[in-house]
């Protein structure tokens, strides 16, 4: 697929999807959804041949993403929101959740509406200090979607999820960090170097263990304790047979950094 609404690259052991409609604050249209879905599936299925043990989502220009492309006055009246969410957003969000490598949203500037929820569904969110997250939906007479009603209560709790949805205010990166919505907020000056270093760290990591822990942590939302303990045993059993575990434990006793091969 030839990408137009995103840029795609691989470097330092990680793949990068850059939402690339900066003149619209990277608002998401049908084409962008299709391209993100395709690129995420490509990374998930071909991460070994691509040499990518992590996937970063970021935005071009002055913000991460302003959510659904509202397309100017008039066009919203003809949108079939149920169809778009079911047929276009759901496969994209599913691809991100199911991706076999860790997904990182590197967020600067605005992350609004579906743009906020696109970030929040990633495994790790790193935000620059001046970034903000906004459940903008009620400002335009909608309710949160794109996984927002799933992720927000789980990450920040019911009280914060309700307030964020009802008041649709900007949640600063620091606030998001305090609420547990994101992994970390870093100074604007350090942001670029910082998320790239984080991505490169994952890019040199034990990708089999990463995939296993992703499956376990996602499954805990549905499992009871016994199911979760059984799943941990099964997944850890696999990790225990990996070359990366051998290397990691030898490196520990040799007091040197592990050189993981991935899997
Ligand atoms: O199934 C479905 O289709 C429904 C799914 C819905 C999911 C959703 O995401 S609904 C929520 C959609 N998003 C929003 O409501 C947010 C709309 N944007 C804003 O409120 C503001 O742009 C921001 C607060 C995010 C940022 O404000 P600011 O002042 O930094 O930037 P700006 O000047 O408003 O925007 C810059 C440009 O981007 C501007 O274009 P212009 O005037 O320079 O030509 C603006 O029109 C454009 N833009 C911003 N958001 C969108 C957009 N264009 C299309 N769609 C947008 N969502």
Image: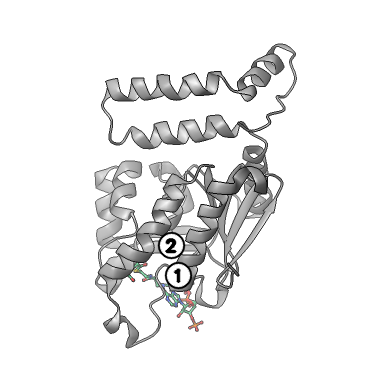
- Work out whether 258 lies above or below 211: above
- 33 vs 2, left or right, is left
**Are the two marked residues, 2 and 1, in contact with CB atoms closer than 8 angstroms?**
yes
Q: Position of residue 79 (x, y in %)?
A: 30, 78
**How many other residues sit within 10 Å of disc 2, few (<14), some (14-19) or many (≥20)?**
many
Q: Is mark 1 within 8 Å of ligand 1?
A: yes
Nearer to me, 96 or 189: 96
Who's the residue at 62% across and 51% down the image? 15
Label 1 sits on residue: 28
Callout 2: SS? helix
Q: Quadrant of the C terminus?
A: top right
**How many other residues sit within 10 Å of disc 1, few (<14), some (14-19) or many (≥20)?**
many
Callout 1: SS? loop
Label 2 sits on residue: 115
- Work out whether 146 lies above or below 20: above
Point out the tag, 2 or 1, that comes first from the N-terminus: 1
Q: Position of residue 30 (x, y in %)?
A: 43, 72
Q: Position of residue 192 (x, y in %)?
A: 66, 53
Who's the residue at 48% across and 72% down the image? 31
Q: Is mark 2 within 8 Å of ligand 1?
A: yes
The quarter holding residue 54 reads top right
The quarter holding residue 141 reads bottom left
Q: Residue furthest bottom?
A: 74
Q: Quadrant of ligand 1?
A: bottom left
- 46 vs 182, left or right, is right
């Amino acid at each position: 697929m030839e990408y137009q609404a995103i840029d795609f690259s691989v470097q330092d052991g990680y793949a990068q999807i850059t939402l690339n409609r900066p003149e619209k604050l990277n608002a998401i249209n049908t084409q962008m959804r299709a391209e993100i879905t395709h690129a995420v599936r490509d990374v998930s299925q071909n991460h070994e041949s691509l040499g990518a043990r992590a996937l970063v989502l970021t935005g071009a220009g002055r913000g991460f993403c302003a959510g659904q492309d509202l397309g100017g006055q008039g066009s919203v009246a003809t949108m079939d929101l149920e169809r778009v969410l079911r047929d276009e957003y759901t496969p994209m969000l599913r691809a991100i959740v199911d991706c076999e490598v860790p997904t990182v949203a590197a967020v600067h500037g605005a992350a609004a509406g579906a743009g906020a929820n696109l970030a929040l569904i990633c495994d790790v969110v790193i935000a620059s200090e001046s970034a903000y997250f906004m459940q903008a939906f009620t400002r335009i007479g909608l309710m949160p979607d794109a996984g927002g009603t799933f992720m927000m209560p789980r990450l920040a709790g019911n009280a914060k999820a309700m307030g964020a949805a009802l008041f649709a205010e900007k949640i600063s990166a620091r606030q998001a960090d305090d609420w547990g919505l994101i992994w970390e907020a870093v100074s604007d000056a350090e942001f670029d170097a910082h998320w790239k270093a984080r991505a490169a760290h994952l890019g040199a990591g034990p990708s089999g263990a990463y995939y296993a822990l992703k499956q376990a942590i996602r499954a805990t939302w549905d499992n009871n304790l016994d199911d979760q303990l059984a799943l941990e045993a099964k997944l850890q059993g696999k990790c225990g047979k990996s070359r990366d575990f051998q290397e990691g434990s030898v490196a520990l006793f040799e007091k040197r950094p592990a050189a993981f091969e991935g899997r």
